[in-house]
Image (cartoon, grey):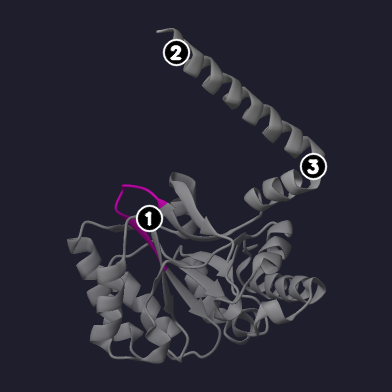
């Protein structure tokens, strides 16, 4: 028994010593401690939310063209999908104001897709801020909406880009499921990519630009199959308001 208590005392003393050493090390290296804390608190892009509820946000990027957007809107209407989020580029909004107004009038959420379709990580913060403000001005002038959500062109970003956009008041939105519709891989491929990969709280990337030539045919099947799986559709903002955020720095 005496040996057992001796081992307990020795273990306890070692644990206390280790804690003291750890606290002393952190006190001697405040810069490293602050860096770790700053990394933990760094702004992040949103990819999905953690929820057990079967909700999904269908999102559509539009940066050019007039042939695909309206059929996408009509398809959503026919399918009874009243909740979706459209990320509009500034130049497209100015060139096609009637379609942008229709998106707003139909009750869909509008986010910003920036101005020039370039990779933001290649440019300084001043350029990023200018692009965001130009897009805001165009979208607000046409639709009356001040976007709170931002999706960078090509989905290109890094921690600096996220930090810059977050400092302007945006929530940076990416996606968890990519339809790859812009590659026009075939309607079946698009439908299967979405319906087999989607999870509760998902954000799905699609396009309503003219580059996406097969999305109009794929969309009704996507909507039908997701409903058969028990999903209902919400906007990105509704998704974020109702569940724990799943995010990444990159």
Look at 36% across and 91% down and name the residue there.
184
The N terminus appears in which quarter of the rendering? top left
Q: Locate residue 162: give its quadrant.
A: bottom right
The residue indicated by pointer 3 is: 30
Q: Earlier in the sequence, mark 3 or mark 1?
A: 3
- Which span of residues is magenta-colored? 50-58
Give the camera-side residue of 76 and 218.
218
Look at 73% across and 64% down and name the residue there.
164
Q: CA distance from mark 2 to mark 1?
A: 56 Å
Q: Locate residue 27: give its quadrant.
A: top right
| Residue 227 position within the rendered picture, expressed as x and y whole percent measured from the top left | 22, 62
The residue indicated by pointer 1 is: 201
Look at 81% across and 39% down and name the residue there.
28
Secondary structure, mark 3, is helix
Give the camera-side residue of 161 and 204.
161
Q: Would residue 244 appear left or right of 191 to someone viewing this image? A: right
Which numbered dot is residue 229? none
Residue, far left: 228
Q: CA distance from mark 3 to mark 2?
A: 41 Å
Q: CA distance from mark 3 to mark 1?
A: 38 Å
The residue indicated by pointer 2 is: 3
| Residue 138 position within the rendered picture, expressed as x and y whole percent measured from the top left | 68, 75
Crowd rating for badge 2 (residues with CA inside 10 Å; few <14, some 14–19, many 20+)? few
Q: Earlier in the sequence, mark 3 or mark 2?
A: 2
| Residue 58 position within the rendered picture, expressed as x and y whole percent measured from the top left | 39, 67
Q: Earlier in the sequence, mark 2 or mark 1?
A: 2
| Residue 59 position within the rendered picture, expressed as x and y whole percent measured from the top left | 44, 69
Q: Would residue 237 appear left or right of 213 to someone viewing this image? A: right
In the image, residue 153 sits, relative to residue 31, either above or below, namely: below
Look at 26% across and 58% down and name the residue there.
231
Secondary structure, mark 1, is loop
């Amino acid at each position: 028994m005496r040996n057992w208590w001796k081992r307990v005392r020795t273990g306890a003393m070692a644990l206390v010593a280790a804690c003291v050493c750890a606290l002393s090390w952190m006190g001697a290296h405040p810069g490293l401690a602050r860096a770790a804390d700053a990394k933990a608190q760094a702004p992040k892009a949103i990819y999905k939310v953690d929820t057990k509820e079967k909700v999904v946000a269908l999102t559509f990027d539009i940066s050019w063209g007039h042939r695909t957007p309206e059929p996408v809107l009509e398809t959503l209407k026919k399918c009874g999908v009243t909740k979706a989020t459209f990320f509009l580029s500034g130049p497209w909004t100015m060139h096609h104001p009637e379609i942008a107004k229709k998106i707003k009038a139909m009750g869909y959420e509008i986010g910003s897709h920036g101005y020039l379709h370039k990779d933001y990580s290649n440019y300084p913060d001043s350029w990023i801020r200018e692009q965001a403000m130009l897009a805001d001005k165009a979208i607000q002038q046409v639709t009356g909406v001040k976007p709170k959500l931002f999706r960078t062109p090509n989905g290109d970003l890094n921690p600096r880009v996220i930090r810059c956009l977050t400092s302007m008041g945006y929530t940076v939105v990416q996606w968890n499921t990519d339809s790859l519709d812009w590659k026009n891989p075939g309607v079946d491929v698009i439908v299967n990519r979405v319906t087999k990969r989607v999870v509760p709280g998902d954000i799905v990337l699609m396009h309503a630009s003219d580059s996406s030539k097969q999305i109009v045919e794929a969309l009704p099947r996507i909507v039908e199959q997701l409903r058969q799986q028990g999903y209902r559709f919400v906007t990105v903002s509704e998704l974020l308001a109702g569940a724990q955020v799943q995010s990444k720095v990159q």
